[in-house]
Image (cartoon, grey):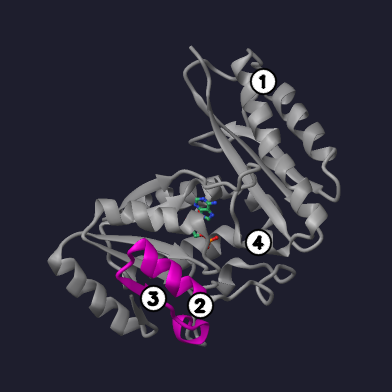
Amino acid sequence: VRVITGLAAAHEAVLSLRKKGSVGFVPTMGALHEGHASLVRRAKRENRSVVVSIFVNPLQFGPKEDLRRYPHTLAADKKLLMKAGAHLVFVPSADVFYASDFQTTVEVKGLTRGLCGRSRPGHFTGVATVVLKLLNLVPCDRLYLGQKDYQQYRVIAQMIKDLSLPVEVRLCPIVREPDGLAMSSRNAFLSKQERTSAAALNRALVDAAEAVRSGARKGSEVTARMRSRLGAAPGARLDYAELVDAESLEPVVILKPGRTVLAAAAVYYKKARLIDNRLIGVKR
Ligand code: AMP
């Protein structure tokens, strides 16, 4: 697997890959796990070449967030990417990626108001900006994103549509640990007790899906169940537990037959904020 750090060099290398056939692109922040690998494998099935970026984007971290502690595991990441079949890894450094006079951002308005956007002001502007810049440097046919960050997927898909970017977006399923906890680079920050407690996140979402399947049609009824599950998780402090429309991300008051809703939650542990979600189809 070829590692490139320069911006112009990456662009040129991707252009020459593209002459040979389609290119799939998987942007990441590194500290890779099986969730990332699943995106790479899917991209590999659907394209001639796979490009992965590893970049811990300072623009998407708030001043009190974990930018400085975010794990860096480049040697292990390269091994994982080689095994998963990536062709090229783009690893820019922050000072080259953002020149000292950088002053342009991309803001997606409505979709970023709720859920993670509420507790992380500016986060999705950082995400949209870095992804647009990455798409300019890595001109690909298909972009692979994980459902783990569902709001991020919606924001990026909206930006791509609004700005007519010539790329297809593919949403990939959440890869989980055996107890249901969604894999995340931030799980490494959990203590042993917190790691056990964290399984409650997925359980609350499964519980929400179960409630809908057995006929619950009031959003407040479903979110109350999620909140009580999460409230009982030792060491967890609730950020949010919500039921929103899967497309608009607006809160759902009454679940309408035939619609898809998103149950989404975020909790804080001492050194990590964890998120998870589940798409739920409402029976006709
Ligand atoms: P990150 O490195 O956390 O920025 O994630 C890079 C990409 O991998 C994003 O599209 C994430 O949604 C995706 N991803 C992260 N964790 C998982 C997971 N457990 N399952 C599937 N995709 C994931």
Q: Secondary structure at mark 4?
A: helix
Mark nearer the N terminus (1 vs 2): 2
The image's mark for residue 186 is 4
Which span is picked out in magenta?
Answer: 75-98
Real-space CA distance between mark 1 and mark 4, rounded to the nearest whole angstrom: 29 Å
Residue drawn 48% across and 65% down? 28
Q: Measure how far apart labels 4 and 3 are at the Cα level.
A: 22 Å
Q: Please tell me which of labels 3 and 1 falls first in the chain.
A: 3
Q: Any mark on residue 242, and which?
A: none
Q: Amino acid at mark 4?
A: Arg
Q: Residue at x 49, y 23 (%)?
A: 259
**What x and y, as percent, mark residue 19?**
13, 68
3D distance between C-alphas at marks 4 and 2: 16 Å
Q: Nearer the viewer, residue 194 or 244?
A: 194
Identify the residue position indicated by label 2 in the image: 74
Q: Is residue 110 left or right of residue 43?
A: right
Residue position marked by numbered label 3 in the rendering = 90
Image spot of residue 258 (x, y percent): 47, 18
Q: Is residue 78 magenta?
A: yes
* In this picture, residue 220 sits left or right of residue 281: right
Does the magenta segment cover residue 121?
Answer: no
| Label placed on residue 211 | 1
